[in-house]
Image (cartoon, rainbow, N blue to C red):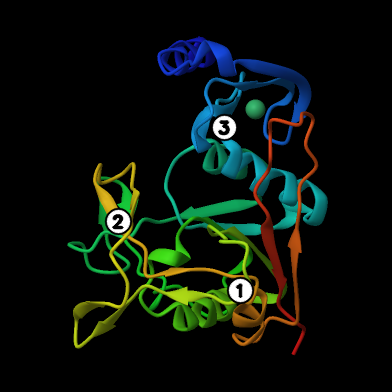
């Protein structure tokens, strides 16, 4: 079975002193165990679907704030993983894409649609739900990205997403793009990108003003959702929820 294979590979990274588990209801696969394999950020997994802390947090936000998922056309800014699997079987329809710099926007490579969130090729008002996890900190012009995500949403549409939050008030810009060249304002920090296998540059560390940055793109209701946790060793990620108004 697929989940046994996944769990077996997860056990390869187990840190015995950190091992812990709790019974819980997974937002993606239902009654399950939440396990902590090690103390790293990615050390907490659902034992059945192998979803990690970030996807599980997004899933909890979906359960809490998007009750009519079966009536929604969804768009997720990644092409695989437990969140994609869940949306594919739960939403009315699902579009997925990856940022593939060598493939023209809107084209497909290896069955995966290429999109740049700063200039999406989808028509206005294409979706009722958009989701993304740990993407926007890597986008040079995030204001344009939020405006694009607002554009492709229908009135009353919802965007749910995560970005790393440093806990302080103000977003810290680490780098910017000038005439196509990256200019570093702070020492470069790279996050792991499972698709490319190497690190991907973080253009900024977001503060609590992320909510204002999202509002500035036109979203009418924007708040941060803290998912519940079944165990003290699992600290879920805050999920930003943003609704588009009707006008
Ligand atoms: Zn699960």
Q: In x, y percent, where is residue 178?
A: 23, 86
Instruction: Give the mark nearest the N terminus, 2 or 3.
Output: 3
Task: Residue under label 2, please give it.
Answer: 200
Residue in the picture at 25% in, 42% down: 197
**Above or below, 233 relative to 94:** above
Report the Cα–Cα distance between label 3 and label 1: 25 Å
Disc 3: residue Cβ within 8 A of ligand 1's nearest atom: yes
Q: In x, y percent, where is residue 155?
A: 71, 78
Q: Are discs 2 and 3 less than 8 Å apart at CB?
A: no
Report the Cα–Cα distance between label 2 and label 3: 22 Å
Task: Residue under label 3, please give it.
Answer: 51
Residue 213's image quarter?
bottom right
Task: Residue under label 1, please give it.
Answer: 210
Q: In x, y percent, where is residue 57?
A: 67, 45
Residue 34's image quarter?
top right
**Above or below, 4 relative to 132:** above
Residue 188 in sight here: yes
The crowding category of the residue bearing disc 3, from other C-alpha atoms within 10 Å (few below 14, some 14 to 19, many at least 20), is many
* Label tally: 3
Label 2, secondary structure: give it: strand
Ligand 1 sits in quadrant: top right
Residue 82's image quarter?
top right
């Amino acid at each position: 079975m697929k989940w046994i294979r996944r769990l077996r590979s997860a056990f390869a990274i187990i840190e015995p002193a950190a091992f812990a588990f709790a019974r819980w209801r997974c937002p993606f696969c239902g009654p399950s165990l939440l396990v902590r394999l090690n103390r790293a950020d990615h050390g907490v997994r659902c034992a059945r679907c192998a979803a990690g802390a970030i996807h599980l947090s997004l899933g909890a936000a979906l359960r809490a704030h998007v009750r009519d998922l079966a009536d929604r056309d969804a768009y997720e800014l990644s092409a695989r993983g437990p969140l994609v699997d869940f949306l594919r079987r739960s939403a009315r329809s699902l579009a997925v894409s990856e940022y593939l710099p060598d493939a023209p926007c809107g084209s497909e490579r290896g069955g995966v649609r290429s999109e740049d969130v700063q200039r999406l090729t989808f028509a206005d008002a294409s979706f009722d739900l958009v989701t993304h996890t740990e993407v926007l900190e890597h986008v040079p012009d995030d204001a344009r990205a939020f405006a694009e995500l607002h554009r492709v949403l229908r009135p009353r549409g919802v965007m749910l997403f995560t970005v790393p939050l440093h806990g302080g008030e103000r977003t810290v810009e680490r780098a910017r793009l000038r005439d196509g060249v990256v200019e570093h304002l702070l020492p470069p920090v790279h996050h792991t990108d499972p698709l490319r296998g190497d690190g991907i540059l973080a253009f900024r560390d977001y503060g609590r003003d992320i909510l204002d940055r999202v509002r500035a793109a036109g979203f009418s209701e924007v708040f941060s959702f803290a998912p519940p946790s079944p165990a003290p060793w699992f600290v879920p990620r805050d999920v930003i929820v943003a609704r588009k108004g009707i006008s």
